[in-house]
Amino acid sequence: MSRHWTIRIAAPALALSLLAAPANAAEEPSEPFTLTTVAEGLQFPWCLAFLPDGAMLVTERGGTLRIVREGTLEDTPIAGVPEVYVKSQAGLFDVLPHPDFANNKLLFLSFAHGTDEENATRVVRATFDGTSLSNVETIFTASPTKNTAAHYGGRMLFLPDGTLLVTLGDGFNFREEAQNLGSHFGAIVRINIDGTVPPDNPFIGKEGARPEIWSYGHRNVQGIARDPGTGRIYANEHGPRGGDEVNIIEPGLNFGWPVITYGVDYTGARISPFTEYPGMEQPFLDWTPSIAPSSLAFYTGDAFPKWKGDLFTGALAFRELRRVDLEDGKVVGEETLLRDLDERIRDVRQGPDGKLYVLIEDAEDGKIARLDPVP
């Protein structure tokens, strides 16, 4: 089975030339835009979320939750954020308002929890009154714990039925566990907002399987988005050296890591002889060399008509924003944006105004920036 779009460059010299000068670097963007700084002074911003009153919430990986009101980043962080394990890739990840936040004031946070010896991805829900969190309740903690500070996943997405998808990682040193349904390593899980398990999850009643698992065989899922028109769920994940993927997520599917991969280990050693295997899904799209995808947005706005129905992801390794051009559910091309910034794009979101917002990751002066259309 081979139904995916591949971006692959075989020769190392060509890979280096692409890094230095992508094919469309000199081309005008398909939708002209200007870039406006909305807020600055953030430290390693990781996730951006919009509230109904126009405010924006931003997580900083170091464990703080910030708020931007009327274009101003408030000096005082949001109080009540639980203790976060911060080291290497570990920290505070997503913030996600409930779809009915205007009435119930519920926020969901994902973060690394624990110690060097025992840590895992955790999700809490809390009530937000505009300045602080209260009624903080743990609704999910990945199991088993691990002793590495890498590959947590941490992205969240609400489905129309009110259930919550949470992406996870393989813990880096535990990649074989991504094929073990008795472990949350390398899985996407689906839970109710109180942490209980939906009765129609695909592995309910399967002996030895974790009932929260929705799909498995992932490496480190760093973005998830839904096409509201078709209901199709897209997720991207980091490969090792090559083999970054976008997958179409359906319940019960096995996406193959580490049995099948288009990448190799960081040492250059082969991880597996297989790129296909019975019962395992092929990626919808894969990138070799790795772009290091960060976050994922499905664009439905009217500000950029030519981009409607396309996917957007940050590309940390290439220091750019990448547009995946979709037509009738198929990849027909890609476009490089914001390459001249030479900045790491950690998150990309569609705002309530139909424009695109990006988080520019920096240790001392991270920014929120907005793409504005040019008439």
Image (spheres, rainbow, N blue to C red):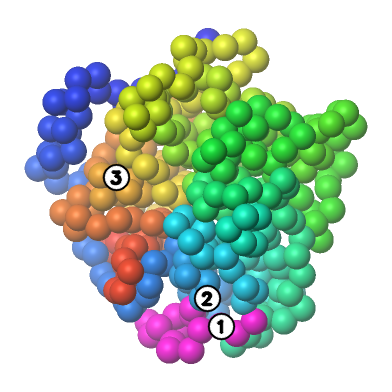
Whichever of labels 2 and 1 marks the residue nearer the N terminus, that label is 2
Label located before the other in sequence (1 or 3): 1
The residue at the point 61 percent across, 29 percent down is 176
Residue 249: in sight, yes or no?
A: no
Q: Name the residue type under label 3.
A: Ala
Locate residue 140: give its quadrant.
bottom right
Disc 2 secondary structure class:
strand
Q: For residue 81, what is the image quadrant?
A: bottom right
Residue under pointer 3: 317
The residue beneath circle 1 is 78
Categorize mark 3 by other alpha carbons within 10 Å: few (<14), some (14-19), many (20+).
some
The residues colored magenta run 65-80
Q: Which mark is residue 65?
A: 2
Discs 2, 1 touching: Cβ within 8 Å? yes
- In the displayed structure, would residue 218 be above or below residue 270? below
| Label tally | 3
Local crowd at mark 1 within 10 Å, few (<14), some, or many (≥20)? some
Q: Is residue 18 left or right of residue 98?
A: left
Secondary structure state at the residue bearing disc 3: loop
114 and 212: which one is in front?
A: 114
Residue 362: image location, x then y, percent:
31, 66
Q: CA distance from mark 2 to mark 1?
A: 5 Å
